[in-house]
Image: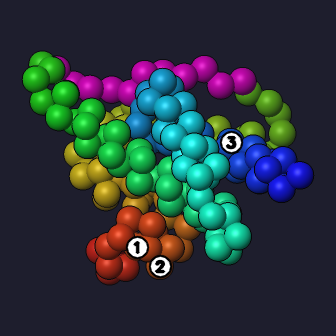
Amino acid sequence: MPDRDDALVFEETRPRLLGLAYRILGSRADTEDAVQDTFLKWRKADRDKIETPAAWLTTICTRRCLDLLRSAHKSRVDYVGAWLPEPIHTPIDDGTENTLSLASSLTTAFLLMLERLTPKEWAAYLLHDIFDVSYAEVAETLDIRESTCR
């Protein structure tokens, strides 16, 4: 039964992880890979020692995205032209939560601006401004000083 509860905890956090990973990576395939890798680490982790599962999952997912972003950046070095994330179709619902989510969606111009940031700067911005994570938590997640996050 504990495995079922752990899977439920992950499934409750999955939509947030998907949103975070997509905003960092800009690719649906990479997003799904990062979230799946996060799930695999979650399954192997000693969950009795994890105080806040959502924060732990966010940290692991963010770090995996940064790893993927670094490796993707190396492959884009040879690409001629601007790199833009692939568009993703999301259903629009009139609910308040979906309206807020739509309002916080990133536009192409915003993505171009974000592309100029380093992967850690990008992740710090998204975690704080989009997902309302405190600077202290962002610093811990990215393993950098809090003042650097600001």
Residue range in magenta is 81-91
Residue 136 tag number: 2
Left or right of 147, for residue 97? right
Q: Amino acid at mark 1?
A: Ala
The answer to whether marks 1 and 2 mark residues whose Cβ atoms lie closer than 8 Å is yes
Task: Tell me, for residue 139, which label it has, or none.
Answer: 1
Q: Is residue 6 magenta?
A: no
In this view, the residue in front, 52 or 79, is: 52
Please name the residue shown 58% across and 63% down the image.
Answer: 56
Q: Secondary structure at mark 2?
A: helix
Residue 36 sits in quarter: top right
Give the total of numbered labels: 3
- Position of 29 with respect to 46 (left or right) is left
SS under mark 3:
helix
Depicted 79 relative to depicted 32: above or below: above
Q: Which residue is mark 3?
A: 15
Q: Residue at x 40, y 73 (%)?
A: 139
Work out how far the residue at label 1 is from the one at label 2, CA to CA, in angstroms.
5 Å
The residue positioned 32% from the left and 73% from the top of the image is 144
Overall secondary structure of the magenta section? loop
Q: Position of residue 95 (x, y in %)?
A: 84, 39
Q: Residues within 10 Å of mark 1 (few under 14, many from 20)?
A: some
- The answer for how far apart the CA atoms under marks 3 and 1 are is 23 Å
**Residue 20 in sight here:** no
The residue at the far right in this view is 1
Quarter in which the C terminus is drawn: bottom left
First in sequence: mark 3 vs mark 2: 3
Q: Earlier in the sequence, mark 3 or mark 1?
A: 3
